[in-house]
Image (cartoon, helix red, strand yellow):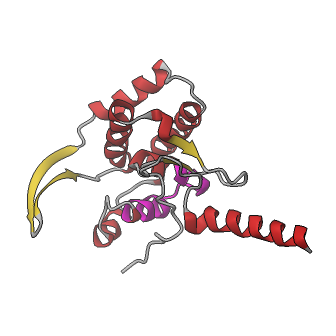
Amino acid sequence: MKNFETEKFYLVGNNLALDFANSLMFELTRENLLGWAIAADLVAPEQAENLLPKWDEAQLAKVSDFRELLRGLFINLADGKKIRQFEIEALNKILRQPGGFSSLKETPEGFVKHFEIEFSAPSKILFPIAESMVDLLCFGDLAYLRKCETPQCVLYFYDTTKNHRRRWCSMAICGNRAKAAKFYQKTKMRS
């Protein structure tokens, strides 16, 4: 069984589309796309192994273009700019393609609506990502869309904290570094 790297992807955005846009720091290969899809719970590891030989590298261009479009969209939205017509059209183009179907599953906690996707091509993964983006635009408050405050960090997130004062992509990634640097500066000033 092939072991896909999943730990390298930062799923800190609180939104599937944000997490996908944040994956731009990694080259888009079939392996990386499937690793990200496993990390995002879109694809099971055993399913990914079966998909790998079916996915043609040439089909990744559409996925890459959409990821770059999302990244630019999030940068602009976080800066308070409006969504542009071509971005709406790109989202709608993905949403018009057959993506899958909803199914009802019973769990010990109750019922869950689950979206089943047929991943015959890498571009099929874009449907739930586009749907997540539409949900954020329609039901989210874009004032809570933020870039991590660490200057070197390129990650964006949707702040779902109670007081909406989240500053870093992740406390474990950038928050601890920022706090440690601040502490070091304080102790250095006292010396």
Residue 101, picture quadrant:
top left
Residue 84 visible somewhere in the drawing: yes
- Does residue 56 belong to the magenta stretch? no
Residue 90 relative to residue 80: left or right: left
Could you say which is closer to the camera, residue 147 or residue 34?
147
Q: Residue at x 63, y 62 (%)?
A: 174
- Does residue 33 belong to the magenta stretch? yes
Quarter of the N terminus within the rendering: bottom left
Q: Read off the magenta span.
A: 22-38
Q: Residue at x 31, y 58 (%)?
A: 42
Residue at the extreme front of the image, as rendered: 190
Quarter of the C terminus within the rendering: bottom right
The vertical placement of 102 against 51, above or below, is: above
Q: Residue at x 14, y 47 (%)?
A: 102
Q: Position of residue 93 (x, y in %)?
A: 35, 29
The vertical placement of 51 against 97, above or below, is: below
The vertical placement of 107 against 56, above or below, is: below
Residue 145 relative to residue 175: left or right: left
Residue at the extreme bottom of the image, as rendered: 1
Q: Position of residue 130 (x, y in %)?
A: 36, 39
